[in-house]
Image: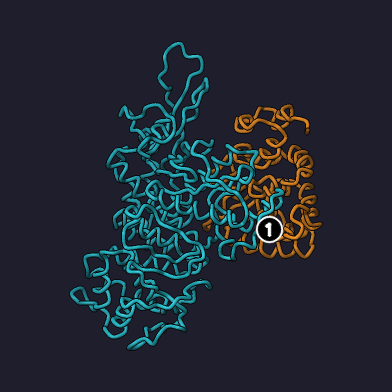
Amino acid sequence: MLLPAIQYGPWSVVKKRMRTAISQLKRGKGLDEVMTRDGMLDTTEYPGMLVLSGIVIGSVPNFHCFMPWMKAWDVLFDPNMPTVPTPIEDAVFETSLRTSWGVLGLLASDSNSWLIPTTRREPFLHAALAAWDEMDAVGTRYCSTFYGERLWSVPNNLHYVLGNMGVPNEILRAPLPPEGPRALLRYIRPPN
Amino acid sequence: MRDVRTQTTRSVGSSSGVAARGGPELVPGKRTLTGADGLQLGGAPGAAPPVPGRPPAAGPSGQGDGKRGPARAQEAPESPRVDRLIHLLTTTPPARGVDAWDEAYAFLNGLSHSLPDLLATLSGAADRGYLPALLARALAANLYAAAAVVLSALYAVELARTAPSSVTNEQLNRAGVILDLISSDQQLQIFEYILNQRGISVAVTTMMEGVVAMRERKAAAAGGGGGGAPGSGTGGAASGASATGGAPAAGGPATATAAGPAPVEPLPWAPPGDQPIEFYIGNEAHKGIARKYKAAHGDDTVRANNYPLSSILYTLDRLGRTPNAGALNDEERALMPDIVNLTRLHLYEIKPLAAQRLGAAKVKMYHGLFARAGVAMALGSVSESGTSGGVPAPGGVYLFWSPEPGVIVYQYRRARLVPVPVPEPEPVIVRRWRLELQPLTPQQRAVVTTTTVGGAMLLVMMLLLSPVGI
């Protein structure tokens, strides 16, 4: 899987880069442009974890996949219109859905704030299902603590969205059926 | 990991130990530092009274190290002890040689019977710019019987005054090694002091947690308490915390499944880079427990470890609640609670078992802050799913449970958790299982013991690798 090079490195380095990236997003620059400015890295060629939540410090490089979404949400949030996303926030969300790395960023549990508006959940679900195989093929390198796991095993926003669409929690905590997350769609309850 | 956490108080607390006082009070926004005798200490360096004698080499204003956090030390020191210490630092020479005498450290050694007094005195001197002078002659502490206590307090005061982004692993290692040499009660008093600081690095509080957790493990190993030793017959039915507040006998409630739950195996002992062991242990406990909680509440909006109150209040706003963020000041909005469930409005603080009281005080402080912001947050229930069980730890497991509302405590144990069937009268329709602690396998032990470590960490590793008496 290809991930933006800007996400890769020790946390202290990535954090600094992301500070710049977030200010660029706030000024209205496109997510694609901001994230891919340093090119893309193939996860098979670079060691390290794909971090979905919980900051991993230390000098070891990892892909900090929840960035910039986790920190950007606070910056793009407008306290004067708390329940309505700003146009920039909407633009970042929509752009994220167009790429696998963007979907992975939103899938990170530390990006949960982006999925609070209910209108975003269905588009996100479709994008996540479409990118699932590519993301899952990375294997046991996803982490929210300090050891690698398969994507489904790490708390993530697909659990959140499916859970809020009616999929029982015990199903979300169980191993994924061989058909993948699509198999869980049958548990979705129609909205009231 | 929580990146930067700001603490908002500077109360050292009274002279009695944490356990003797029925729990500490964490008061956000409090800006005075009160010693055992009620002395008001601290103050803006510039407002300090003239100091007798010569100034220290680094100069009495600021810290001389350029690392001081911006919000620190606006108080005026008034303690005669602080004046006395500064007088000794400025008028007497440092010790030269092993048989020498150091007036300043002899004085501090005399204060070591009361750790809060010692911390207050060192804090007062540090507030007036004498921390570099104290550190420069710190070796002299070893001339006296209470060297470990004095140095532990000194390093805690140093860490509390180092800007969050400037705390080094070397500083953490040095403090961790010396903190391991003092009693559990003294460790807790220093932990309380650290928790009460404003603008402190989260790495420091996490490292303190790790120190306490590792001591606890050794105590549990020596006493065989908590966790239910394999074959000891102390396991009993797994139904949460025991009446005495110890670990649940089997590391969590029993589960009813046809096949047993998976065992919880130790993970490799692999601190990334030169990460201090204590930090590693404390940090991974927080992550692992938060992960378990999140997994149990997949459809809830949960914030854990890394989120300042400002962000949490924004999220509550987005969820359609209307918190009043303006009711909190900047320092309060920068605080980071351990677990907040924004769907259920539940709060938890995670602490090692020995620091349960500190966790209770802290969660009550957060509860008060949310209330002030107009959010009716509740202390999380002790029976909530995801608040008890076992999670993998570096070279062992963490047992965790909620002994009182809003508090999750954990124990680090060098062992593995394996499922055992709960004895039930036949015929069994659905087998119930509980997890029980078992010693590491020889292979697992070998992996840990062959891990190489260097420098100051070696001492801590040797202690950690002491025989496990679960």
* Whole-percent x, y for residue B77 in the image: 39, 77
Q: Nearer the viewer, residue B69 or B174?
A: B69
- Residue that badge 1 annotates: A74
Q: Nearer the viewer, residue B47 or B155?
A: B47
Seen in the picture, residue B182 relative to A131 is either above or below; the reply is below
Rendered residue at 72%/35% (across/down): A165
**Residue B222 located left or right of residue B405:** left
Q: Chain of mark 1?
A: A
**Residue A157 located left or right of residue B443:** right
- Here the colouring is by chain
Seen in the picture, residue B268 relative to A30 is either above or below; the reply is above
Residue A48: tell me if it is visible: no
Rendered residue at 40%/56% (across/down): B24
Rendered residue at 70%/36% (across/down): A162
Residue B43: tell me if it is visible: yes
* Whole-percent x, y for residue B214 in the image: 37, 49
Q: Nearer the viewer, residue B224 or B369?
A: B369
**Residue A43 located left or right of residue B181:** right
Seen in the picture, residue B334 relative to B246 is either above or below; the reply is below
Who's orange, chain-wise?
Answer: A
Which residue appears farthest toward the top when viewing the image? B427
Element class at badge 1: helix
Per the rendering, the colour in which chain B appears is cyan
Amino acid under label 1?
Answer: Asp
Callout 1 crowding tier (Cα within 10 Å): few <14, some 14–19, many ≥20: some
